[in-house]
């Protein structure tokens, strides 16, 4: 009986300790690359307002207060804009993943062209601005998962996507 209790306490203790151990996640990449370009906050919102027709902004009752993802094209350059805003008590905010998908035509299946994970800021807000060059002759869209974290127990995830663009 005492042995059983000791075994249970040991297992519970190990599980609790395993939740406290930090881990590192790595982003998956392929041949395409993001180009991180610094822009001002005014430029960011000007670009976002120019492409507001495919932006989705919603209000939630959880940790994420507003979010959006948008895409614009210029030649063979794809510009991805978005943000995640949390309540002021949020300590980590951003995207768990952003996936650029492509397909040959409307009848074919979407394929993941480029995947990035763990785009965060250790604050209650995160702005996303990326540019990539893509081959013509395909349709493109961006899917993402917005993320906000208040503590180790309280997190929120919201899926989102842009409209489809033809190149």
Image (spheres, helix red, strand yellow):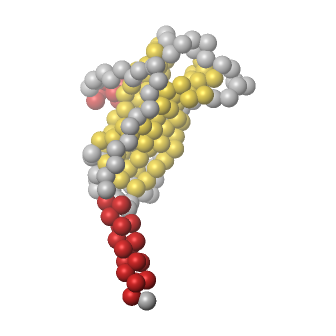
* Place of residue 95 in the rendered image (x, y in percent of width and height, measured from the top left): 41, 41
Q: Residue at the location (50% across, 16% down)?
A: 134
Q: Is residue 8 left or right of residue 103?
A: left
Q: Residue at the location (46% across, 15% down)?
A: 133
Q: Quadrant of residue 125?
A: top left
- In the image as oriented, which residue stretches furthest toward the bottom? 1
Could you tell me if residue 75 is visible in this image? yes
Q: Quadrant of residue 25?
A: top left
Tag count in the figure?
0
Could you tell me if residue 52 is visible in this image? no
Q: In this view of the protein, which residue sits in the foreground, 115 or 147? A: 115
Q: Quadrant of residue 13?
A: bottom left
- In the image as oriented, which residue stretches furthest toward the right? 107
Q: In this view of the protein, which residue sits in the foreground, 2 or 167? A: 2
* Place of residue 141 in the rendered image (x, y in percent of width and height, measured from the top left): 55, 28
Q: Residue at the location (36% across, 60% down)?
A: 19
User: Where 141 falls versus 83 (above or below)?
Assistant: above
Where the N terminus falls, by quadrant? bottom left
Where the C terminus falls, by quadrant? top right
Q: In this view of the protein, which residue sits in the foreground, 158 or 6? A: 6
* Place of residue 55 in the rendered image (x, y in percent of width and height, measured from the top left): 49, 34
* Place of residue 32 in the rendered image (x, y in percent of width and height, measured from the top left): 45, 19
Q: Residue at the location (57% across, 11% down)?
A: 136
């Amino acid at each position: 009986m005492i042995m059983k209790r000791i075994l249970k306490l040991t297992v519970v203790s190990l599980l609790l300790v395993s939740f406290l151990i930090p881990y590192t996640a790595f982003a998956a990449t392929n041949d395409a690359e993001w180009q991180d370009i610094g822009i001002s906050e005014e430029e960011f919102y000007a670009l976002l307002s120019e492409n507001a027709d495919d932006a989705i902004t919603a209000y939630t009752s959880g940790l994420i207060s507003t979010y959006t993802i948008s895409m614009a094209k210029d030649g063979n350059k794809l510009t991805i804009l978005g943000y995640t805003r949390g309540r002021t008590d949020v300590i980590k905010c951003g995207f768990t993943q952003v996936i650029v998908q492509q397909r040959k035509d409307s009848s074919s299946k979407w394929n993941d062209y480029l995947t990035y994970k763990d785009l965060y800021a250790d604050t209650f807000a995160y702005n996303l601005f990326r540019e990539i060059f893509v081959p013509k002759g395909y349709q493109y869209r961006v899917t993402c998962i917005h993320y906000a974290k208040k503590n180790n127990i309280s997190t929120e995830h919201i899926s989102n996507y842009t409209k489809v663009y033809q190149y």
